[in-house]
Image (spheres, grey):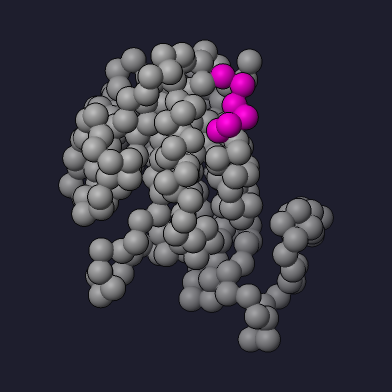
Amino acid sequence: MLLFQQLAERLAVPLYQSLNANIPENLFLSWREGCLSLLDRENIKKRGLTVDIEHRHGEQRSWPIAKSGPLAQALGRKTRTVVDATAGWGQDSLAMFRMGYEVVCVEHSPVMAVLLADGFARLAKPDWMRQLNLAPPQLLTGNAIDILEQLPVKPDCIYLDPMFPPKRKKSALAKKAIVVLRDLVGDDADKEQLFATALKIAGKRVVVKSPGYAEPLGGRPNESFQGKLLRYDVYLTQNGVSMKCLNG
């Protein structure tokens, strides 16, 4: 109970020992099957949503995996350090980590941040991580604009995956994780300001992930790499300074 109590106090949310119809909340945090899970009333008896640290389907199991595909092309061959300023469920951050990039994640939602922290703690435990002396991505919690402006050194790349409005109201239902994430963080009304800050701070490039139908966030990009449903727009900066390590 102490661990639950500490988390409830840190997040300033109620702590319930059992759930019933009189509880007003629709979302709940709970430890299940060794993971911190986010539940809603529809899946209250299931495991819920967790930060998935496993390799993607068909992905090679060794580390680092090959830098291939639109994401790697957008990040660039000379990029070494990446700040993911819109971490969300952390799947892009983990993909970049598995490709061997030094990754720092920024997440402004306290709830998403504790879910990410739980996922990264689980990532640190497998034997292959210890044998290679690897540490999970660093996690910073707070307003991404403020955090970027306070970075002690410039990352090679700042990666943005902001929320974009759905293409049409009657589109197919989005994945549950995306729906819940939108409920928690909203529609990123400050994404233009975040992009402007990223362009000022990044040492070499800013990469913006967007759905294929969306207009480029920063106007015409220097390069663009298209996936099946997503697009990675690349904006080169004039800063010319890269960082060696965010940890000093």
Residue 149 colored in magenta in the image: yes
Count of marks, rendered view? 0
Lateral position of residue 227 relative to residue 56, left or right: left
Q: For this rendering, which residue is in front, 46 or 214?
A: 214
Rendered position, 188 above or below 91: below
Does 7 sit above or below residue 193?
below
Query: Where in the figure is residue 95, as x and y percent of width and height?
Result: 38, 35
Determine the residue positioned at 53% across, 71% down: 40
Q: Is residue 202 left or right of residue 22?
A: left
Residue at image location 35% in from the left, 56% down from the top: 164
Q: Residue at x 52, y 58 (%)?
A: 185
Question: Magenta span has 73?
Answer: no
Q: Which residues are magenta?
A: 148-153
Quadrant of the snapshot with the C terminus? top right
x and y percentages locating residue 172 in the rendered image: 25, 69
Q: Nearer the viewer, residue 101 or 118?
A: 101
Query: Where, quadrant-wise, is the N terminus in this rendering?
Result: bottom right
Q: Position of residue 216 (x, y in %)?
A: 27, 45
Residue at x 42%, y 40% (from the top left corner): 195
Q: Residue furthest bottom?
A: 22
Report x, y in % for residue 12. 75, 61
- Vertical placement of residue 118 versus 14, above or below: above
The secondary structure making up most of the magenta span is: loop
